[in-house]
């Protein structure tokens, strides 16, 4: 009697496990360009709300005791430098009507990268393009009359290295940049995920050099996790509730965190705590347990150096992500109260959830219908055209979204092998997510 013949896919599994694709998507993805424009508007809007809300508590609490839910709505306290945030009260921050959102380091480097891609013919920025863009659009302390260039730690070091003629990725080499393991790349590269909807393989290619401009090792891997999350968001409309969608994305993006790295350990620590203690108010105990395990005890080989470490803020961001459960307001609230560099994780998830909700969804989440769509890039950066000469600021979220669409158009055709047909993108699925 002959042995039964094994199906071809089983033979692939046995003899060629690498041939099994990570992606469950088998048919081309069809996306509406107009809908995506609205989502990009929601991205910038949600990111600005979260950024400025988190700035109120930035560096207020970098050691226990930390803020708790009871501190929401109370007066802001001085941060580690003895300064107060932009709001006198710990609460959601809004610019409304004809007021203008100020640029900050959570949005302005992404703005630069979008501008550089908009002006370029290529899809992947070169080291020279990144250097030239940074030098053209970032203030130097030498000639900014206020003596402030709105750069810190690894970004600051990378910029000064570029001024000396050193190109990325050498600007993040540990021997050149001792702050390569700080948070910087996590807050400057998420947008590359949105330029490659549903294709994290492409998103990570175009984000690789921008990430390596300032980050290595765990800081790099955490940034890749964020980029993957933003790209995967386009695949989640049929994945259930916002909580289900966030969980689906996170479980796939975590593959960018290598086994044995401290960022992978942080992911598994926070996720395990959330699975055991999923009540909304349990976030405080999980944050405190994370602080004890990593900042105090050095779990998984993590060595805390500064409150803007990539690691400590990555863990804090996961606390707000899981316990926020896809609720924009709750995610921002937890991120604002969690501690450390609190405007950065809030901006990351505010932008991602804002993208998933779209402009109207962001407005509905806060019950506010007159949120400003104007943006003042020259608050922190320089040398951009004034695209809104009749209004305050130099740009608007709809215009920024329109330029983002044009970048996606180019990537769909040139890097994804897809098609642009009037208001529709047809994007072939990735054979492998990464």
Image: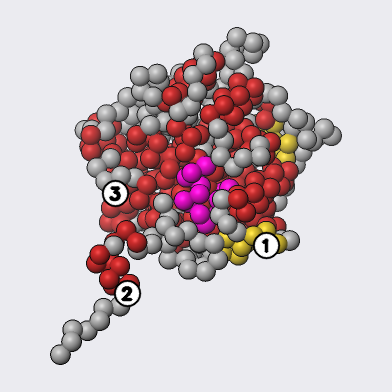
**Above or below, comparing residue 146 to residue 298 in the picture:** above
Position of residue 396 measured from the top left corner of the image (x, y, whole percent): 72, 40
Q: Foreground residue, 95 or 298?
A: 298
Disc assigned to residue 155: none
- Residue contact at pointers 3 and 2, CB within 8 angstroms: no
Disc assigned to residue 8: 2
Q: Nearer the viewer, mark 1 or mark 2?
A: 2
At label 1, counting other C-alpha atoms closer than 10 Å, the crowd grade (few under 14, some 14-19, many 20 or more) is: some
Position of residue 138 measured from the top left corner of the image (x, y, whole percent): 61, 22
Say which label, 3 or 2, has the lower sequence index: 2
Position of residue 327 measured from the top left corner of the image (x, y, whole percent): 50, 54
The quarter of the image holding the N terminus is: bottom left
The residue positioned farthest toward the bottom in the image shown: 1
Q: Which residue is mark 3?
A: 268
Report the coloring of the rendering: secondary structure
Predominant SS along the magenta part: helix
Q: Which residue is mark 1?
A: 424
Is there any visible trace of residue 201 in the rendered image?
Answer: yes
Q: Residue at horizontal 70%, vertical 57%?
A: 34
Is there any visible trace of residue 179 in the rendered image?
Answer: no
At label 2, counting other C-alpha atoms closer than 10 Å, the crowd grade (few under 14, some 14-19, many 20 or more) is: few
Q: Foreground residue, 62 or 43?
A: 43
Q: What residue range appears in magenta?
A: 194-206
Say which label, 1 or 2, has the lower sequence index: 2
Cα distance in 3D space between marks 3 and 1: 38 Å
């Amino acid at each position: 009697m002959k042995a039964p013949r094994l199906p071809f896919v089983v033979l692939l599994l046995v003899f060629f496990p690498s041939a099994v694709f990570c992606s469950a998507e088998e048919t081309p993805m069809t996306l509406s360009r107009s809908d995506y424009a609205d989502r990009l508007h929601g991205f910038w809007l949600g990111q600005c709300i979260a950024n400025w809300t988190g700035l109120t508590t930035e560096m207020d609490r970098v050691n226990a005791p930390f803020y708790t839910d009871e501190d929401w709505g109370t007066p802001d306290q001085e941060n580690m430098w003895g300064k107060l945030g932009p709001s006198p009260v710990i609460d959601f921050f809004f610019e409304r009507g004809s007021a203008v959102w100020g640029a900050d380091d959570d949005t302005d480097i992404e703005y630069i990268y979008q501008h550089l891609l908009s002006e370029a013919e290529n899809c992947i920025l070169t080291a020279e393009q990144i250097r030239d863009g940074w030098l053209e659009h970032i203030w130097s302390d030498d000639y900014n009359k206020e003596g402030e260039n709105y750069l810190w730690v690894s970004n600051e070091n990378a910029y000064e290295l570029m001024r000396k003629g050193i190109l990325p990725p050498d600007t993040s080499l540990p021997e050149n940049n001792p702050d390569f393991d700080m948070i910087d790349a996590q807050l400057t590269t998420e947008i590359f995920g949105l330029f490659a909807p549903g294709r994290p393989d492409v998103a990570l290619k175009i984000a690789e050099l921008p990430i390596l401009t300032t980050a290595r090792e765990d800081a790099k891997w955490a940034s890749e996790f964020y980029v993957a999350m933003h790209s995967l968001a386009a695949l989640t409309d049929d994945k259930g509730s916002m909580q289900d969608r966030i969980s689906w994305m996170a479980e796939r993006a975590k593959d960018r965190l290598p086994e044995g790295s401290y960022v992978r350990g942080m992911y598994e620590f926070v996720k395990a705590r959330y699975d055991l203690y999923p009540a909304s108010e349990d976030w405080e105990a999980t944050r405190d347990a994370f602080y004890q395990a990593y900042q105090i005890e050095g779990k998984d080989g993590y060595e805390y150096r500064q409150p803007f470490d990539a690691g400590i803020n990555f863990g804090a961001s996961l606390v707000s992500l899981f316990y926020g459960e896809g609720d924009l307001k709750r995610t921002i609230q937890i991120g604002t109260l969690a501690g450390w560099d609190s405007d950065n994780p809030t901006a990351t998830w505010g932008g991602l959830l804002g993208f998933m909700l779209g402009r109207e969804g962001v407005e509905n989440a806060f019950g506010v219908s007159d949120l400003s769509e104007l943006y003042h890039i020259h608050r922190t950066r320089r040398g951009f055209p004034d695209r809104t000469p009749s209004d305050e600021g130099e740009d608007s979220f709809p215009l920024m979204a329109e330029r983002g669409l044009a970048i996606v158009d180019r990537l769909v055709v040139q890097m994804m092998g897809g098609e642009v047909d009037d208001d529709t993108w047809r994007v072939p699925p990735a054979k492998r997510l990464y």
